[in-house]
Amino acid sequence: MAKKEKKEPDKPSTAWQGTYGDMITLMLCFFVMLYDPNEVDTAALSQIQASISIQAESIESPTTSGGQSMAVGRLADLGNNVTSMPSVDKGRSLGQVKKKAVSLFAPEINSAKITISSDERGLVISLASELLFNEGSADLNIDETRDILVKLSNFFQDSELKNRRFRIEGHTDSTPVSGDVFPSNWELSATRAANVLHYLADFGVDENSFSIAGYADTRPMFSNKTKEGQAYNRRVDIVILDEGHF
């Protein structure tokens, strides 16, 4: 009697992979929607990047025999970096500070008197020059700006900004100054920054937490070839400095 051949078992179905892939994609989209770039702590991000670099170097150049483990010293450094990262509980992230500033200065933002942004320096509060000064002048229009300066001074004294450092930066357009008061736009921009600081100090801020800088027309936001661009470039920026720029 002929021996029956054994039937090979059917290959397992891969139909589940399509459903699994759809689920992973939906989860990725969900977490991307939750991600808020304003919450990124640049100091923490820098330390994470440093930690990853240390780990990568250790993998590429193992120092123990057999290549089964990484150097103890580098691992210790990695652990120290992770455990010493700034804590949100200590108020080191500027994300919440930015949200508070946007809410507090909403009327001024809507009327284009103030703009708020973030860059590698930290949180930047830009004041329109037309609001503060007449063209070519460093004298504050205090009657028109008193309320804003009081609001700014109260904001900088908030408990969330305790032990923070600030820098007031004056900017001009490319139009040469006329008259004998300021030899160039350098002096004009620096004097504008200093005058803003003096008035904020009059309203209660600690001058020792601030520094000033004048950049003349070297850091324009827009082209100086148009009147609109020049108006945006004439500004005063108050920067809440990130810890890496103290």
Image (spheres, rainbow, N blue to C red):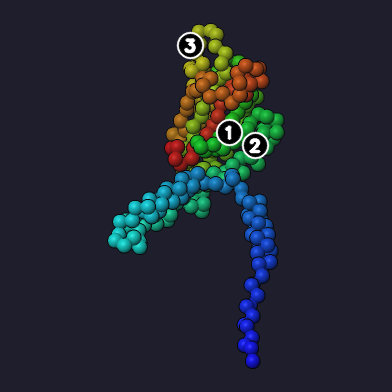
Tell me the quarter of the image containing the N terminus. Answer: bottom right
Secondary element type, mark 3:
loop
Q: Distance between the residues labelled 1 and 3?
A: 28 Å
Q: Which residue is drawn at 63% across and 32% down?
A: 115
Q: Please report whichever mark, 3 or 2, sits nearer to the chain's N-terminal start.
A: 2
Q: Residue at x 33, y 56 (%)?
A: 62
Asked if labels 2 and 1 touch by Cβ distance under 8 angstroms, the answer is yes
Residue 18 lies, in percent from the top left, at 68, 62
Asked if labels 2 and 3 touch by Cβ distance under 8 angstroms, the answer is no
Let me know if residue 159 appears in the view.
no
Q: Please report whichever mark, 1 or 2, sits nearer to the chain's N-terminal start.
A: 2
Q: Nearer the viewer, residue 166 or 68?
A: 68
Residue at which label 2 appears: 105
Q: Residue at x 41, y 52 (%)?
A: 56
Q: Distance between the residues labelled 1 and 2?
A: 10 Å
Under mark 1, the amino acid is: Ile
Asked if labels 3 and 1 touch by Cβ distance under 8 angstroms, the answer is no
Under mark 2, the amino acid is: Phe
* Mark linked to residue 125: 1
Residue at which label 3 appears: 183
Q: Residue at x 50, y 44 (%)?
A: 42
Tell me the quarter of the image containing the C terminus. Answer: top left
Mark 2 Cα within 10 Å, few/some/many (few <14, many 20+)? some
